[in-house]
Image: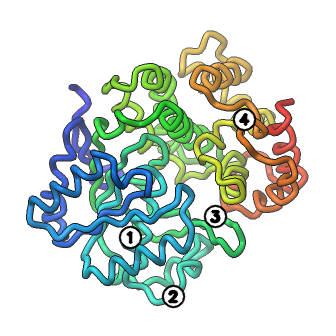
Amino acid sequence: MKYVSNWNYPTAVRFGAGRISELAAQCRQHGIQRPLLVTDAGLASAPITQAALAALRAAGLGAQLFADIRPNPVGANLEAGVAVYRQGGHDGVVAFGGGSGLDMGKLIAFMSGQTRPVWDYEDIGDWWTRADPAGIAPVIAVPTTAGTGSEVGRAGVVTDESTHTKKIIFHPRMMPVVVICDPELTVGMPARITAGTGMDALSHCLEAYCAPGFHPLADGIAVEGMRLVAAALPRVVADPGDIEARAQMMAAAAMGATAFQKGLGGMHALAHPIGALCDTHHGMTNATLMPYVLNFNRAAIDERITRLAAYLQLARPDFDGFLQFILDLRSRIGVPHTLRELGVEADRAALVAEMAVADPSAGGNPVPLDVAATRRIFDTAWAGA
């Protein structure tokens, strides 16, 4: 297969089919003798997880599994994971899975040597400087979905149950020391999860590209990431065993997370509270919101989207052509057209609108967001108007 490579962008990435075989060697290389393999509850008994755990133990490493993690992780999951890490005398984390497993793995490693509550390190101003960098354990990230890109990120998302608010916890040293991107690990994903995570990658690239500010590096990564998604996502939903399309999607996921250092926007600002309140799949929520946020932002992004449509070689290379491409893609892979179809209750509108404005992603929207604006987007997305 041609998609095999070693990258250092933004961290060391070992990319290619079969490269999960290097996991134990990478642990040793980075001084991890007793790894805690962190994944979500749904993946704990999966063959790929058990095989990774067995390989670590066969190599003589004191590996243990922690999987008490909800699909939208909460603070209690983090506390339990840190307790297991400390009690087991672990010296590093293998963050294994989709966004929840990857985020929680990074957060457990981050909090393993801290003394303050995790909420004190929220991504606000310079709060990250409150952390003791010597108390942050090394992480090896192994994504098993192609969506969040958390494997190349310096933050993790966790829900504060006391306020039902998703919090972004940030520290530069949360970046994994190495990432193993093996597209074979994604072959067993159900079509709905493949679609939702793939649209999450697209939303990261799209919102980063539309975010205001001068960042041509992020823009270039974002547009190529969107080209990969446009070509590969329909293929991989239709044929789960298409390993080349799986590889392209895995690359696009990492590209989206690299690009969104520039910023995100209204899709994520609304998706975060909707996920926290209604426990919806994050990627699928972004996908449902996508055309409504695009339309809301049209006046500010029309020219930019026209350039993107031309790069994607759409039949109609303008905003309307791109919007139709999004609608067609969503329909083709089974994305709900409305928040109502996603299972979101209409009576959540006012609270979601308020929480969305307070979300850190809101600041990256190309059109300023206030409560009236987020309520308008919610109502339109709920009704499908």
Residue found at x 44% / y 52% = 42
In this rendering, position of residue 31 left or right of residue 316: left
Q: Which residue is mark 4?
A: 301
Which element is circle 1 on? helix
Asked whether 250 or 99 is in front, the reply is: 99
Mark 2 vs mark 3: which is more N-terminal? 2
Residue 18 location (% of width, % of height): 19, 38
**Which of the 4 image quadrants contains residue 132?**
bottom left
Q: Which residue is mark 3?
A: 166
Colour style of the rendered protein structure: rainbow
How far apart in space, not on screen, are marks 3 and 1 (Cα)?
21 Å
Q: Quadrant of residue 7?
A: top left
Marking on residue 116? 2
Which kind of residue does numbered mark 4 sit on? Ile
Q: Nearer the viewer, mark 1 or mark 4?
A: 1
Quadrant, the C terminus: top right
* Nearer-the-camera pick, 308 or 286: 286
Question: Is 175 rendered above or below residue 85?
Answer: above
Say which residue label 1 marks. Answer: 173
Position in image of residue 339 (x %, y %): 76, 40
* Number of residues whose C-alpha sits closer than 10 Å to that of mark 2, classed few (under 14), some (14–19) or many (20 or more): few
Amino acid, disc 3? Lys
Q: Earlier in the sequence, mark 3 or mark 1?
A: 3
